[in-house]
Amino acid sequence: MKRSPKDTATSARRIGRRALVVGGLQAGVVGMLGWRMRQMQVEQADQFRLLAEENRINMRLIAPARGLIYDRNGRILAENAQNYRIVIVREDAGDVDQTIAKLKQLIYLDEGELERALREMERRSPFVPVTLSDQRAWDDIATVAVNAPALPGITPDVGLTRNYPLGPDFAHVVGYVGPVSDYDLEKNPDPDPLLQIPKFQIGKTGVEAKQEHRLRGEAGSKRIEVNAAGRVMRELGRDEGIPGADLQLTVDQGLQNFVQARLELGLSASAVVMNPQNGDLLAIGSAPSFDPNKFVRGISSADYGELTGNKYRPLANKAVQGAYPPGSTFKMMVTMAALEAGEIRPDETIWCGGYTKLGRRRFHCWKRGGHGHVNLKESLQQSCDVYYYELAQRVGIDRIAETARKFGFGQHFDLPMSAVSSGVMPDKNWKMESYGQSWRVGDSLNAAIGQGYVLATPLQLAVMCARLSTGTAIEPRLIKSVDGVETEIRGGEPLGFDQANLDLVRGGMYAVSNTLRGTGYRSRIDVDGKLMAGKSGTSQVRSVVVRNEDVPWEERDHALFVCYAPYEAPEVAVGVVVEHGGGGSSAAAPVARDILLYALHGGLPPLESYPSSQRQMIKELHDKLPLRREMAGPERSRA
Amino acid sequence: MSYLEYNVKTVPAGFRKVLYLNWPLVILLTAVASVGFLMLYSVAGGDISQWAEPQMKRFALGLALMFAVAMVPIWFWRNMAGLAYTISLLLLVYVEFFGVTGMGAQRWIDLGFMRLQPSELMKITLVMILAAYYDWLDVKKTSRPLWVLVPLILIMMPTFLVLNQPDLGTAILLVAGGGAMMFLAGVSLWYFAVVIAGGIGLVSAVFSSRGTDWQLLKDYQFRRIDTFLDPASDPLGAGYHITQSKIALGSGGWTGRGFMQGTQSRLNFLPEKHTDFIFTTLAEEFGFVGAVSLLSLYALIVIFCIVSAVNNRDRFGSLLTLGIGATFFLFFAVNMSMVMGLAPVVGVPLPLVSYGGSAMIVLMGAFGLAQSAHVHRPRGR
């Protein structure tokens, strides 16, 4: 085909024109691209730079060391132990199954633990270390380290975990820690970022829980650079947190050990030992107990079921949670109220014929035949119920309650332990509010002998005894110092009772323990200068009187005893409750006396402290007690 | 018209042709490719052997190919246009059945030493056949419906094959490149008005087909469009790439974070960082200055093509050079728009910079054609 030069020229011109149009369009697009670059890289650069930094920099929390807990002498109760772990990194391990098989030939691996680890490994990125086994002995770690070349991807690792070297002795007081759960966060929303750390340990019960704010410390952090897959490339900066505060408790680990061992003989019992001068709680025992270390490691459901299913309730801290009818130990309160109100003279006698008649109802004395003529001292010494039925009618519940509250009944003590109970100190208003019924005289009679609505914890019994012995409103205290700073002693001021009246009540308690007809005479201390004063109590669980031996354990009477010593200059006050133990003088008094003696001696007392007839029996008892001997090796004391 | 119509005497012959090459273009191409080597070295974390070295070898091969193609008279290439187009089309049909599947698409023929993507080849041979067609066609017939239909068929055949792979990016480049050729050849503007109107209709048809039995695009292509329209809707899923790409680009600032200092690419936040998204690494490490410099180099290459074409009175040579320039322009414009969030992610590499064999060799061959047109352009009269 032939084309004329004119055609060619026209065509070339047209192409030229169109080329310019296309070129113009292209220039427009290039301009737009350039404008977009300017917009992103110049105008919004800061914003994008920030996003890039957020992409690459991660904050990782560093858990601070938890505060330690010591006893009053600096013996450690809760420590941060080295936790040796065996960790595997999947991408370094090559054939995971083969490597684990090799590891199994060297050390024992728990199958359940292994299965969990394998599952976790599948879920995580290949470079994330997964714990194969926890809480290993040093020997296992050494074995793994020595065989490292044959175990690719497996490394020993060390972390911190809570350990309670004294095991069950302080399970109720110190409590235990455990990994933070969703339930914890729901119940108690806490913005502390530390709680987001997987398996972070927080206090679950006891001092560990109640002093969590002091023990936890503050989170540190490290800034790390990560890549898109989350792999850590390098550490950019680090800020060590603030470790938690160390706590020193008022308890004495030796005494606590003795108290726990002594209580264990009574199936289900609790005791509180207190210094009446400064309020220091020297021991808080609750038997049976449990090993708190099991909870730290994650208790098996079988072990847990055993603890919850046990009818002696090992998990409960009965010393502060258990509220029992105080029985005859309440009679001091009634006596004080009557003396202060001037409703009774010390030498005035009341005739006990074995019961009091109120309308058609009979209120019996524990002694069927009656005590005959009884004065104030004898009423405490022999625990005559009829005497107190009479006082109750004279004084009235409101004045009794007013006095008892000053001694700590119904009072809530703000101590760092779980579920501290306030007990119940009823009066007319209380009954109206609680039951919508008016108070009856019969209620007063029951209350006067510590039955009916009155409930008190062993802690409250010990406090009552301490306040009686000193006449001051001393407050119990459990924390001696925080990071070396002594906590204040509270309640040293006088209760405001007439000194003569206090002496009369103390005299009654002295008679209980040191005179032949006293209910606690058998459980006395036979050393001059360390004589004790006490009061027994037997509180009925059921209303019909039958012999304790004839009914199942759950229906037997609670045995109670309160005491302090030395009588002249009180140093130790004790409250003991043996659940369903039977009579206070037979089941609780010996326990209270033994604890008192140990506390006074600061160790196992010589047999000479006991009445001569009991020494052989006491010796056998001492041999039988599962006391912890002094630990071998260097003493774990405060550095 | 035959090659005899050229004033052959004015055309340089023998090795003197080398002196008549469009040397500024050669230098610009080398400069752009060098930027590519630098970036491939950087994204490999300072490893030259991983991507940069193979890329250099390919560029050397491409350069040799360009010179070889440039030495052959342009009329030979015009006569080869039909054959080249036919072979490309057959290869496209071949990969439809026997191609190596990668990334969910059938695209490659494994030649052993390299993977050939026939769709890359087609981008150039389509330009060739259209240039040859309009060279042959009587100028007066250019806008007659029957003669408009022929190039449309030539464009649509490979487009449908490529769409079927499915490779949306290449399909767009083929349609846009072919359309540009028709526009340049002087097809009446009315046709373009109609096509644009039809295009709008087609887009709405595509969107309304979603979820029906006659769905026109694959699900992943729809998702890409969704993500393009609102990348924030799925920042960790499909929108992740584009979000991270924009972060990398924006964080470069004026002068960038420094060579090999881009955290986004070094820490693997960037997807496909050595291929389609390599521009983001450049923008991150060299900032606005670096990005605009590369854009300017690209623009200069296109300008040199246009200048060469406008000064070329041979219709085939002129159209071919313009078509190659337009295709090259489409490559980088679509790629840059894509990584800057102006266009959906369609899988178009950054020409001469992205790591990849076929695209590099084919492009260099195409510039060989443009050089041939430049060397053998009619002179004098």
Image (cartoon, rainbow, N blue to C red):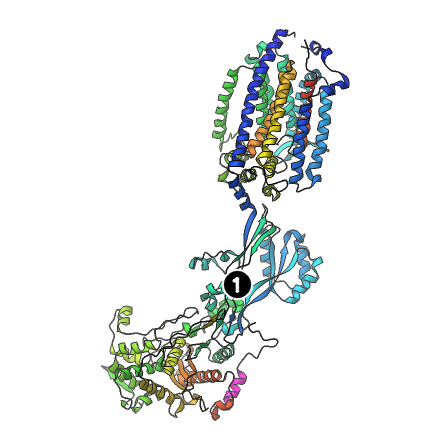
- Dominant secondary structure (helix, strand or loop) of the stretch shown in magenta: loop
Query: Residue type at mark 1?
Result: Pro
Left or right: A449 as drawn, with respect to B155: left
Quadrant housing the N terminus of chain B? top right
The answer to whether any part of residue A377 appears in the image is: yes
Most foreground residue, B3 or B14: B14
The answer to whether any part of residue B160 appears in the image is: no
Instruction: Give the number of marks.
Output: 1
Residue at (58%, 18%) from the top-left corner? A19
Q: Does the magenta stretch include residue A263?
A: no
Most foreground residue, B320 or B24: B24
- Which chain hosts label 1? A
Q: Where is residue B163 in the image (x, y as percent from the top left)?
A: 58, 28
Q: Is mark 1 on a helix, strand or loop?
A: loop
Quadrant housing the C terminus of chain B? top right
Q: Which residue lies furthest to the left in this view?
A: A359
Q: Position of residue A287 (x, y in %)?
A: 47, 76
Most foreground residue, A152 or B352: B352
Asked if B316 appears above or below A199 in the picture, the reply is above
Asked if A228 appears above or below B118 in the picture, the reply is below
Q: Check disc 1 and report the residue beneath it.
A: A243
Residue A542, quarter of the rendered image: bottom left
Q: Residue furthest right?
A: B14
Residue at (77%, 19%) from the top-left corner? B15
Q: Give the range drawn in magenta.
A: A615-639
Asked if B40 appears above or below A450 in the picture, the reply is above
Asked if A221 appears above or below B7 in the picture, the reply is below
Q: Position of residue B311 (x, y in %)?
A: 64, 16
